[in-house]
Amino acid sequence: MPVSTTWRNLRKICNLHIFATPKLDANQYLRRSKVEQLLAGVRESSLIGEAIEIRQAAFKTTLSLISNTIFSIDLADSTHASEEFREIVQGIMEELGKPNFGDYFPIANLDLQGIRRRVAILFRKMMDLFDKMVDERMELRRMNDYISTDDFLDILLQLSHQGNSEKLDRNLIKHLILVDLVIGAIETTTSTLEWAMAELLQNPKVLQEARGELKQIIGEGNLVEESSITCLPYLQAIVKETMRLHPSFPLLLPRKAEADIEIHSFVIPKGTQLLINAWAIGRDPKFWEEPDLFRPERFIRSEMDVKGRDFGLIPFGGGRRICPGLPLAMRMLHLMLGGLIHSFDWKLENNITPESLDMKDKYGLFLHKAQPLRIIPISN
Ligand code: HEM
């Protein structure tokens, strides 16, 4: 969506009703219980020495965290509708993970591999499923004894009835929730978690250092809480270092020059589409010492953050289009990563060594790890 009054309103609503600190604090218990479920599942695998595909586990947990946070439904449960929904979201992820040659040749509607057509079909199915959920909610809302869940869906429906939010119709609500919030959140968070675990398995000393910090600050047997994240500088540094090397949206959102502009003696004419290469910036040897090495220590005594102010590290973008989901993403990532490495030690399967672990990436709309990471949890 281009910058417009509707875009501004939607961002305002999202910031106020989902991403504001008091809102996130109020529903942190939901995320806590979902991370507990994740760890319980991992524990079962650890008892039989079974490898876990981190992407799958992270996908399910992130979907559950997001759907609970936004519309109080657990899309990771085993009902038929949730399973169907999950399959569709996974199908969309797979299609969006493929490079679409049409994107590099700006010829109208070029869709050589049929990706756009297949994604359109999946989106339609997802919208239809979600329509049923919205219908059910509207029916509940009409009942006299309805007690508001006070979740984001309820707030959007309420605002759309008050008519004080320009053009907040049902179609817009569906697109905002499903496309921007569900799809935007899941792939990025899942992929970042998978990269973080892969980097830790490739760098066992970093993993041990992180486990040491968690043991000292959180204590054995306790769960990492959102309120403890600020006391875990090494864990935070691992997340930043992962995002420096593996930004999920390597080219951010495309920009368009609103006027002719000159930058460092390059003239950029009005209307030019601009892509910002966050991936290359994160690996620029002029800026980063030994840029290809995973060294979280570089952030330990540094003020540098991912909030869009430090242009050397912009995995969430910057300026007015900066990712609005940043505060939620950071909570989810630290909770899941902290939980996984605090409660378990990990080893690679099939005698793979840290040196031979395949770290190749694959670029579609997002930057994924090409080979799914499969690792074996070992209970403490
Ligand atoms: C590790 C996790 C995430 C990463 C790395 C990430 C990264 C990004 C980036 C790079 C952009 C474009 C910013 C720009 O071009 O300046 C973006 C936009 C966006 N992100 Fe995220 N994101 C993450 C998680 C989330 C989550 C959890 C949500 C919501 C629940 C979310 C919702 C959005 C939305 C709605 C936009 C579009 C904003 C607009 O159009 O103005 N993201 N994200």
Image (spheres, helix red, strand yellow):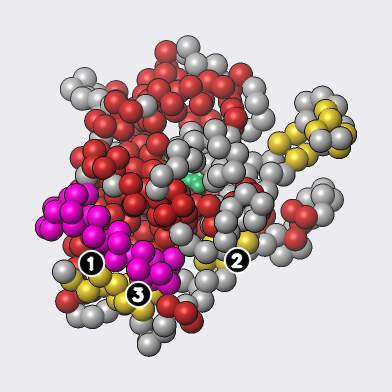
Q: Quadrant of residue 317?
A: top right
Residue 131 drawn at (x, y percent): 44, 40
Residue for point 42% across, 72% down: 202
Which SS class for mark 1? strand
**Magenta region's main secondary structure?**
helix
Which of 85 and 354 lies nearest the eye of the viewer? 354
The amino acid type, in three-letter code, at marker 3 is: Ile
Label 3: which residue?
Answer: 375
The amino acid type, in three-letter code, at marker 2 is: Lys
* Residue 344: image tag: 1
Label 2: which residue?
Answer: 362
Q: Quick check: is 251 in the magenta stretch?
A: no
Residue for point 28% across, 54% down: 338
CA distance separating discs 3 and 1: 11 Å
Residue 256 drawn at (x, y percent): 75, 34
Which SS class for mark 3? strand
The amino acid type, in three-letter code, at marker 1 is: Phe
Magenta-tinted stretch:
198-224
Residue 127 drawn at (x, y percent): 49, 44
Task: For label 2, count other residues whose C-alpha is less than 10 Å away and answer few (under 14), some (14-19) or many (20+).
Answer: some
In the figure, 259 relative to 110: above or below? Answer: above
Q: Is residue 7 left or right of residue 332?
A: right
Q: Is residue 47 left or right of residue 360?
A: left
Q: Are marks 1 and 2 in contact (CB under 8 Å)?
A: no
Residue for point 32% across, 77% down: 347
